[in-house]
Image: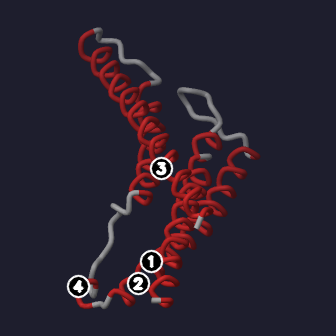
Amino acid sequence: MAALKVLKNMRAKLDKTLEVLLIILMGFMVLNVLWQVFSRYILQDPSSITDELARFQLIWLGLLGACYAVGKKTHLAIELFGSGLSAGQKLLSDLFIQIVIFLFALLVMVIGGFRLMQITLVLNQVSAALQIQIGYVYSILPISGLVMMFYSITFMLDDLAIFASEKRA
C-alpha cells in the first residue's frame, strides 16, 4: 500500500507539472498567433516562422493535453455497458481499458514514435522556416507515450488493489 501511495503522489506531481506546462505552451501559442496576425495585417510584413511554430506548438499541446486527459480519466470513452455492470465487472472493464491504453501507448506512441523520431533524425529532416530537425518535434510522441503508460500502470495498480480488497471482504 505504501508503494501505491508513492505512485499516487508521483501522479499528482505529474498532473501539476502537465497543468503548468500546458498553460505555458498555450500562452506562448496565443502570443505567437497574435504576433502572426499583427505582423500580417497591421505591419503588412508576415513573419515567416510563426505559422510553423504554431503548428509545432499545437502538436506538443495536443499530445501533452492527451496525456493530461488520460491522467484525469477524462479521455474519450464509450460507455456501452457501463450502467448495467456490477461493481466487480466495472472494475474489470476499467482494467481492460487501461490495458488497451497501455498497449496503444507502448506500441504506437513509444515504439512507433521513437522509430519515426529516429528516422527523421538520421535523414536529417529540418523544418523549412525554423531550420530545426523534425525529429525533435516528433520526440513528443515517445515522451507522451511514456507518460500515458505511467498513468495507465498506476490506474491498473489501483484497480488491482481494489479488486484484491474486495476479494478479501
CA separation in Å, label 4 and label 2: 12 Å
Q: What amino acid is at disc 1?
A: Ile
Which of the labelled discs sits on residue 97, or is there none?
1
Q: Depth check: give the residue in front, 19 or 62.
A: 19
Which residue is depicted at the point 32% across and 14% down?
39
In contact (CB < 8 Å): disc 1 and disc 4: no
17 versus 11 height, above or below: above
Q: Mark 2 points at which residue?
A: 93
Give the residue displayed 56% in from the left and 55% down from the top.
147
The residue at which mark 4 appears reads as 83
Tell me whether circle 2 and circle 3 mark residues in contact (CB < 8 Å): no
Circles 1 and 2: CB distance less than 8 Å?
yes
The mark nearer the N terminus, 1 or 3, is 3
| Amino acid type for the residue under numbered disc 2 | Ser
Numbered disc 2: secondary structure: helix
The alpha-carbon separation of the residues under discs 4 and 3 comes to 28 Å
Residue 41 placement (x, y as % from top left): 24, 16
Near mark 2 (Cα within 10 A), the count class, few <14, some 14-19 or many ≥20, is some
Residue 48 location in percent, x, y? Answer: 45, 22
> Label 3: which residue?
12
Residue sitting at 43 percent across and 33 percent down? 25
Q: In this view, does 117 lie above or below 43?
A: below
Residue at the location (55% across, 59% down)? 5
Task: For label 1, count other residues whose C-alpha is less than 10 Å away and answer few (under 14), some (14-19) or many (20+).
Answer: some
Q: Do the residues labelled 4 and 3 touch (CB within 8 Å)?
A: no
Instruction: Determine the CA span between mark 1 and mark 2.
Output: 6 Å
In the image, is 124 to the left or to the right of 108? right
> Cβ–Cβ below 8 Å for labels 4 and 2?
no
Q: Do the numbered discs 1 and 3 sit on residues whose CB atoms are within 8 Å?
A: no
